[in-house]
Image (tube, rainbow, N blue to C red):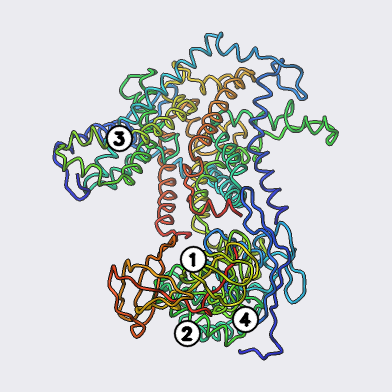
């Protein structure tokens, strides 16, 4: 087969299964969701097919918009915090000798293997009053009495950073390993200390992937549900939590659908941006 | 920008330098004193430690033992960014996010110099390396030779005391390489800056250097001007590494006479000690003799192969030694012989150098 | 700078390991409640994983769903990756985007979409719902790995097979497919692990009838912490860490994650 050939109809037939699956079990559900956003929500029952804008109007009210902006805000913040720490960390990682390098990679991958649920509940404990970090501090004599650090904004932020962190590192890793060490050595021979080398050479070269990493964390955390649900009060909830909440607890599937579509558009825009940046990335070599 | 004689700085001294890595000793004890203002080559096969030495001088590697002195100041513990050096790396290591002017002016910018001064200096350097007007170009748009020149200009921007180059021309094709060898040499003479070039190409070292430091397996084999090292190699390794040579195994009787394959030989210098000796004779010094073998400094043999390259010829003669004897020369030295002919090869005494192992 | 390096690396390692430590300690604590300092050592919670029927059922559900949906994901992804990379198809970018879209978007969107879908068909609360939902959602993973393998495959190999007389089907069966097996396995493994851990889709689609492990854990957390939950987590971590360590020993972990071997050597020598 030749990558320039046009396929026979038999070959195209092979595509029927995967494309069919995707259409039936993704596009159609999405279409139904779009339709549902216009449905009428019956109090007490589910919902009836209709065509009204009630849900969409509700979407653009300040109450909801505030929630949406908070969601976006905390995810942007998580992106910034993650990148600010993950970038220097990954840079140092790529310069290490084999043994510590591989050991750290295993630590990162092990953290990656934790599900969001496990992460949420262990931070729930760590930041709780009864048995977490504050307990250790009391035991060590540093604090007088233990305090609960969750639910709180900081707890949600911490949790979001935690689940996004390994992904962030693994996204930065391939490009940072390609940074020729002779480039930083050259900067040193020109009089730049390691600190100045980092800021005047490494960061500018890596700027495209820093931005891409930031946006990736943003999209990823937008999709998080458990962290915000467990570690934050309702005022700290992200969009995903609201949607799930509306869909299950409130049984207001139409409104949930409306919010979901809004979230989809937002995500697509950001993902598109990432794609644009990656296609313009200067190679690091 | 030429230097006056009294400005010449950059005298380098290495004492007892050793570098051990986890599983290999790259530099096994080096003592060296280099004169300022000269172009010096570190020459040797890969793995001989020449690049490691250069990197220690640059401050990019810490010596396991030993001290490094620059103009009598001990710089061994100083990190690279505090040493007064300029370096050109094998990969050139140009900053991809800066254009030509940005690369060349980087060192000055780090020091906080004013924009005007930086621009003026960058202009000077662009002229110096024949890249006038190319300050705005991006690195990716340059040819191999142009990039080399940018790397050179960048390293020289701060007028360092030492100019270090690690196999700077190895990535270029042959013609460009030869052209740049000459350019670099002329540049160095114009600036009078102490320059150390690491290379594995002995012709490059011979072309450019005032002094050649031949290294092998982490140690220095010989230091000297190129022609000296060529004509008077100090060891079989140097003799074999620099140019080609005929190595003749013989025996010294201890009273000054030497015998090779049963024939008496006179050599340059003396051979007092008794025992096995190795004599090095360059192919172009050996001569073909068609009418009878002289009784001293000659061997007879059969012509095995003749290579006539027009501007020079090479003749391989089997004299019963381990390797064929090579006789080379220009057309006017040619003695017409064919494959299979019986000939004699004469080795003039002053071209026979005893190389100790 | 050296000090900064030590600080950053230490902070990150402590940060990443903190939850792991909590869980490990909690899983062997004698008490139901996690107090510090811990009061005793007990492996009873691990035992409960295998004796308690609720946990056993959940484990069974989770493993079944993960096993089948990952296979289905590979089944969907393979023909798509193969055809799109082998021929010139005008709609190729669009189709590829369709393939990665479910995973790129926040999971809640797929979850809600699946919920309304199954609701509208009346086929609710069944395990197949979750299986299909996971299969579609995670099909992106094998799609990416297999597409990458197709891209880097030496084109000369199937061409050589053609010159030796193999037709399209035979070439695929005997040459291309065996070469794709590693990427298919990687895609399967990734989908499997992620499916085991996945919550929101499983919950919205059939959370009340099919209680997978994550759903059971979250439900359990509402009523208070049980060390058995911690035991589950430890098992997951141990499996993952072991897998990666084996990979690091027998394979090349750094290269697998995208490092450039030539430059790695330069760094190692420094």
Q: Where B340 sits versus A238, above or below?
A: below
Residue B67 visible in rendering: yes
Q: Residue at x 58, y 35 (%)?
A: A111
User: CA separation, marks 2 and 1?
Assistant: 60 Å
Residue identifier under label 4: B38
Q: Earlier in the sequence, mark 2 or mark 1?
A: 2
From the top left corner, tell me how far across and down residue C76 is, in percent.
30, 32
Q: Chain of mark 4?
A: B
Q: Work out which quarter of the rendered image holds the C terminus of chain B and state it.
A: bottom right
Q: How many marks on residues?
A: 4
Disc 2, SS: loop
Q: Are marks 3 and 1 in contact (CB under 8 Å)?
A: no
Q: Chain of mark 2?
A: B
Instruction: Please determine if labels 3 and 1 lie on a single subunit.
Output: no
Q: Are marks 2 and 3 in contact (CB under 8 Å)?
A: no
Instruction: Please determine if labels 1 and 4 lie on a single subunit.
Output: yes
From the top left corner, tell me how far across and down residue B247 is, in percent.
49, 67
Residue identifier under label 3: C78
Quarter of the image where one finds residue C238 = top right
Quarter of the image where one finds residue B344 = bottom left
| Nearer to me, C111 or A137 | A137
Residue identifier under label 2: B130
Residue identifier under label 1: B262
Which label sits in the foreground, 2 or 3? 2
Q: Work out which quarter of the rendered image holds the N terminus of chain B and state it.
A: bottom right
Instruction: Please determine if labels 4 and 2 lie on a single subunit.
Output: yes
Instruction: Please determine if labels 2 and 3 lie on a single subunit.
Output: no
User: CA separation, marks 3 and 1?
Assistant: 78 Å
């Amino acid at each position: 087969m030749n990558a320039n050939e046009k396929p026979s109809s038999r070959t195209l037939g092979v595509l029927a299964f995967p494309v069919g699956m995707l259409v039936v079990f993704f596009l159609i559900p999405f279409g139904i969701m779009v339709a549902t956003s216009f449905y009428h929500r019956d109090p007490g029952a589910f919902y009836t097919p209709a065509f009204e804008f009630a849900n969409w109007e509700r979407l653009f009210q300040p109450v909801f918009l505030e929630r949406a902006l908070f969601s976006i805000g905390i995810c942007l913040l998580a992106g910034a915090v993650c990148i600010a720490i993950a970038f220097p960390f990954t840079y140092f990682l790529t310069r290490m000798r084999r043994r510590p390098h591989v050991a750290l990679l295993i630590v990162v991958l092990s953290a990656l293997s934790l599900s969001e649920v496990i992460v949420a509940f262990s931070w729930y404990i760590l930041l709780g009053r009864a048995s977490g970090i504050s307990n250790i501090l009391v035991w060590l004599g540093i604090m007088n009495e233990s305090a609960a650090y969750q639910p709180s904004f900081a707890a949600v932020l911490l949790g979001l950073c935690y689940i996004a962190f390994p992904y962030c590192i693994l996204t930065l890793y391939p490009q940072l390993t390609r940074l020729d060490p002779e480039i930083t050595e050259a900067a040193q021979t020109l009089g730049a200390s390691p600190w100045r080398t980092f800021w005047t050479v490494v960061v500018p070269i890596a700027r495209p992937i820093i931005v891409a990493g930031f946006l990736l964390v943003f999209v990823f955390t937008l999709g998080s549900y458990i962290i915000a649900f467990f570690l934050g009060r309702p005022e700290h909830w992200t969009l995903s939590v609201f949607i799930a909440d509306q869909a299950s607890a409130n049984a207001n599937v139409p409104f949930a659908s409306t919010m979901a579509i809004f979230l989809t558009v937002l995500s697509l825009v950001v993902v598109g941006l990432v794609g644009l940046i990656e296609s313009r990335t200067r190679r690091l070599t | 920008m030429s230097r006056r004689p009294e400005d010449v700085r950059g005298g380098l001294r290495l004492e007892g330098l050793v570098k051990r890595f986890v599983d290999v000793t790259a530099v096994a004890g080096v003592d060296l004193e280099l004169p300022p203002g000269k172009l010096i080559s570190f020459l040797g096969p890969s793995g001989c430690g020449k690049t490691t030495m250069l990197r220690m001088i640059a401050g990019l590697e810490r010596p396991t033992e030993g001290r490094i002195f620059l103009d009598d100041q001990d710089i061994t513990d100083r990190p690279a960014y505090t040493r007064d050096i300029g370096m050109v790396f094998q990969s050139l290591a140009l900053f991809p996010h800066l254009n030509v002017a940005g690369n060349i002016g980087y060192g000055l910018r780090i020091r906080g110099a004013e924009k005007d001064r930086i621009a003026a200096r960058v202009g000077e350097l662009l002229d110096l390396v024949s890249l006038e007007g190319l300050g705005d170009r991006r690195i990716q748009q340059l040819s191999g030779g142009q990039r080399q020149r940018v790397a050179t200009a960048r390293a020289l921007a701060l007028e360092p005391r030492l100019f270090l180059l690690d196999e700077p021309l190895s990535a270029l094709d042959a013609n460009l390489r030869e052209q740049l060898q000459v350019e670099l040499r002329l540049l160095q003479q114009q600036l009078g800056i102490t320059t150390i070039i690491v290379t594995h190409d002995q012709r490059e070292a011979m072309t450019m250097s005032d002094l050649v430091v031949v290294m092998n397996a982490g140690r220095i084999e010989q230091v000297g001007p190129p022609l000296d090292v060529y004509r008077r190699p100090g060891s079989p390794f140097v003799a074999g590494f620099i140019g080609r040579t005929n190595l003749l195994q013989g025996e010294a009787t201890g009273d000054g006479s030497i015998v090779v394959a049963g024939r008496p030989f006179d050599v340059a210098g003396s051979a007092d000690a008794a025992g096995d000796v190795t004599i090095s004779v360059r192919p172009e010094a050996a001569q073909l003799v068609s009418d009878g073998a002289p009784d001293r400094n000659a061997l007879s043999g059969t012509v095995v192969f003749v290579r006539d390259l027009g501007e020079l010829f090479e003749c391989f003669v089997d004299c019963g030694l381990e390797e064929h004897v090579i006789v080379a020369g220009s057309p006017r030295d040619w003695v017409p012989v064919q494959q299979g002919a019986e000939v004699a090869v004469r080795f003039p005494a002053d071209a026979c150098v005893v190389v100790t192992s | 700078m050296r000090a900064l390096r030590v600080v950053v690396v230490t902070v990150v390692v402590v940060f990443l390991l903190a939850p792991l430590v909590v869980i490990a300690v909690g899983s062997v604590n004698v008490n139901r409640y996690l107090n510090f300092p811990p009061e005793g050592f007990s492996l009873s919670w691990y035992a409960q994983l295998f004796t308690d029927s609720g946990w056993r059922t959940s484990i069974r559900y989770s493993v079944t769903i993960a096993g089948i949906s990952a296979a289905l994901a590979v089944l969907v992804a393979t023909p798509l990756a193969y055809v799109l990379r082998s021929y010139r198809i005008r709609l190729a970018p669009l189709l590829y985007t369709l393939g990665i879209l479910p995973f790129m978007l926040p999971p809640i969107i797929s979850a809600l979409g699946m919920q309304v879908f199954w609701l509208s068909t009346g086929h609710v609360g069944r395990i197949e719902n979750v299986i299909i939902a996971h299969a579609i959602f995670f099909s992106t993973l094998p799609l990416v790995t297999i597409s990458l393998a197709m891209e880097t495959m030496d084109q000369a190999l199937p061409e050589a097979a053609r010159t030796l007389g193999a037709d399209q089907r035979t070439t695929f069966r005997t040459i291309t497919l065996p070469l794709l097996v590693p990427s298919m396995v990687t895609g399967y493994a990734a989908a499997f692990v992620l499916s085991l851990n996945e919550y929101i889709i499983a919950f919205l689609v059939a959370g009340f009838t099919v209680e997978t492990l994550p759903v059971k854990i979250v439900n359990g957390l509402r009523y208070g912490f049980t060390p058995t939950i911690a035991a589950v987590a430890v098992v997951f971590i141990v499996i993952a860490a072991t897998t990666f360590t084996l990979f690091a020993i027998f394979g090349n972990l750094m290269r697998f994650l995208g490092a450039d071997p030539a430059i790695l050597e330069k760094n190692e020598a420094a």
